[in-house]
Image (spheres, helix red, strand yellow):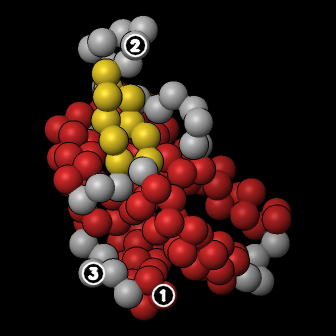
Amino acid sequence: MGKQVLLEERRLHNLIFRKMRSITGDGGEKGFRLQGMIVSFLCEHAGERICQKDLEAEFFVRGSTMAAAISSLEAAGYVERRSDEADRRLKVVTPTAKAEEAYARLASCVRDMENSIVEGISDEELSVYFKVVNKICDNLEADDQ
């Protein structure tokens, strides 16, 4: 039997997060990884109006998953959540100074990791990779509807 997409994706996922754990020293649990990605995204888009719904769409997670992650980050002092002035039903999420400090420490690790992942891979090969990944995502999203 040849290689299977699901097994190879899982292998890739595990290798990436194992390497990230070794670089950052965090426990690498699923919730923590999502929280780290949220903090990074918010810091990279500081000054922009980012709502909880935007984060759900960005990270392809359900509302309850995002609400739990943001609640944990809020309790730990990494984000603040407030009602949007234009639409009180929406919650705007902003990073705190604590989040900005953590992001500054980890941003270079993430850049180094990205560079390590793509080492020896040409721009053309990366283009094909992203094209295939996008098709797989499209297939999965079509099945979801």
Classify 10 Å Cα crowding around label 1: few (below 14), some (14-19), many (20 and above): some
100 to the left or right of 77: right
> Which residue position is annotated with label 3?
27
Image coordinates of residue 124 in percent, x first then y, are 82, 63
Q: Considering only vertical position in the picture, is 144 above or below 1?
A: above
Which type of secondary structure does the marked residue at label 3 adopt?
A: loop
60 to the left or right of 114: left
At 65% across and 61% down in the image, what residue appears?
Answer: 129
> Which residue position is annotated with label 1?
23
Image coordinates of residue 39 in percent, x first then y, are 43, 55
Q: Look at label 1 and name its amino acid.
A: Ile
Q: Look at label 3 and name its amino acid.
A: Gly
Image coordinates of residue 82 in percent, x first then y, are 31, 28
Of labels 1 and 2, earlier in sequence is 1
Q: Considering only vertical position in the picture, is 115 above or below 72?
A: below
Asked whether disc 1 touches disc 2, contact meaning CB atoms under 8 Å apart, the reply is: no
Determine if residue 65 is in view.
no
Q: Quadrant of residue 87?
A: top left
Which type of secondary structure does the marked residue at label 2 adopt?
A: loop
Rendered image: mark on residue 85? 2
